[in-house]
Image (tube, helix red, strand yellow):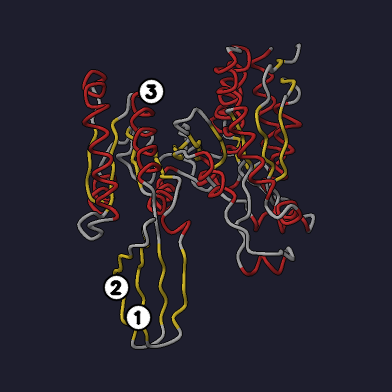
Amino acid sequence: MEKIKMTTPLVEMDGDEMTRILWKMIKEDLLEPYVELNTEYYDLGLEYRNETNDQVTVDAANATKKYKVAVKCATITPNAARMDEYHLKEMYKSPNGTIRSMLDGTVFRAPIVVKGIEPCVKNWKKPITLARHAYGDVYKNTEMVIPGPGKVELVYTSADGTETRELVHNFTGAGVAQGMHNLNGSIESFARSCFEYALSTKQDVWFSTKDTISKKYDHTFKDIFQDIYDKEYKESFEKAGITYFYTLIDDAVARVMKAEGGFIWACKNYDGDVMSDMVSSAFGSLAMMTSVLVSPHGYFEYEAAHGTVQRHYYKHLKGEETSTNSVATIFAWTGALRKRGELDENSSLCQFADRLEKATLATIEKGEMTKDLALITSLENPTVLNSREFIRAVRKNLDVLYA
């Protein structure tokens, strides 16, 4: 068959460790035989980020603003151990955090549902989409180690020099302190992204914070969401037959365990980080979770919701066989290619994305899967495939769809 052509590039952000290995396999076996890939490539592997003083991350985000659609491989966010391992000049910030901040978007994460992989929570019948605020909170915090007795204050100095002070704590001994912030504009973008996504997918929206304890910080989130909903979306939601519901984060956690799913759960940055892992794991596997950053400015960045699979990478370096689940990374590519096709009115590209997803799910439903899924599947006598074998099994099913 003639390869599908792309008229506009999408931004390709390569990554780290085992997911970087899978990235190359997916391109070679599942994409390049069918699509004349047109990408603007950025290497976000930690070594090159270190070489460029992390400028490559900024460049990739700016390219996403230009071309509107990006696909990203999982990347390392360095800690002290990584500083030594990679001989880093500094402990660089999370690439995802940098990109989210620059694109001003909301991260929507949803489980990939497939027959034979049933949720641990038996009443979950439909996917639960986590909407994670993509700015601020602990991810842009300022921390301080307090060596001994003393006073810690929050100080705001206005443009005219006026100071406002709030006591954090009078320390009588050593301790720690941190300051967090957020921006009304970012919260407004978060709210609108959630409401727009809900209308496009015809799903209810839950939003949860802890405003009873955080009476200014979290309450601001609650108030902004309610104000935007009432003024801009209430009528549209009613016409669409969907609802907006606010509750405390602890109540939301209790409710979600008894719900059937099929809704969007909007969370602040940290809550969304934690709850998306909980939901994805309960649905089957962290490697079965899609993630897309949606900006109200019209930018879309697709990635897998999991990390770089460090343990498997070290096995790979030793020449040992790995059975690493590539489904979420495959779906990152299909999401980006489909969106590129939609924006360019390229129906062939959209159809390819649909077929690749269908072939991927069909592979699992036939009982061919990686080890993580074989351990939890309800299918009898599954065939455990290694990393390359699984991707090639998907290729066979994709070839059948194009036969």
First in residue order: circle 2 vs circle 1: 1
Q: Which label was assigned to residue 167?
A: 2
Residue at label 1? 151
Mark 1 Cα within 10 Å, few/some/many (few <14, many 20+)? few
Q: Residue 352's quadrant in the figure?
A: top right
Question: Is 177 or 393 nearer to us in this picture?
Answer: 177
Q: Amino acid at mark 3?
A: Ser
Task: State yes or no: discs 2 and 1 in contact (Cβ < 8 Å).
Answer: yes
User: Can the viewer see residue 394?
Assistant: yes
Q: Quadrant of the N terminus?
A: top right
Q: Amino acid at mark 1?
A: Lys
Q: How far apart are the two marked residues, 1 and 3, measured between alpha carbons?
A: 50 Å
Residue at 38 percent across and 41 percent down: it is: 185
Mark 2 Cα within 10 Å, few/some/many (few <14, many 20+)? few
Q: Say whether residue 278 is left or right of residue 390.
A: left
Q: Amino acid at mark 2?
A: Leu
In the displayed structure, 43 sits above or below 309; it is above
Residue at label 3? 200
Point out residue 263 in the picture as x, y percentages from the top left corner: 32, 34
Point out residue 56 in the picture as x, y percentages from the top left corner: 69, 46
Secondary-structure class at tag 3: helix
Point out residue 177 in the picture as x, y percentages from the top left corner: 40, 73
Residue at 69 percent across and 42 percent down: it is: 14
Residue at 56 percent across and 35 percent down: it is: 302
Question: Is 364 or 35 nearer to us in this picture?
Answer: 35
Question: Is 214 or 238 nearer to us in this picture?
Answer: 214
User: Can the viewer see residue 383?
Assistant: no
Secondary-structure class at tag 1: strand
First in residue order: circle 2 vs circle 3: 2
Q: How far apart are the two marked residues, 2 and 1, measured between alpha carbons?
A: 8 Å
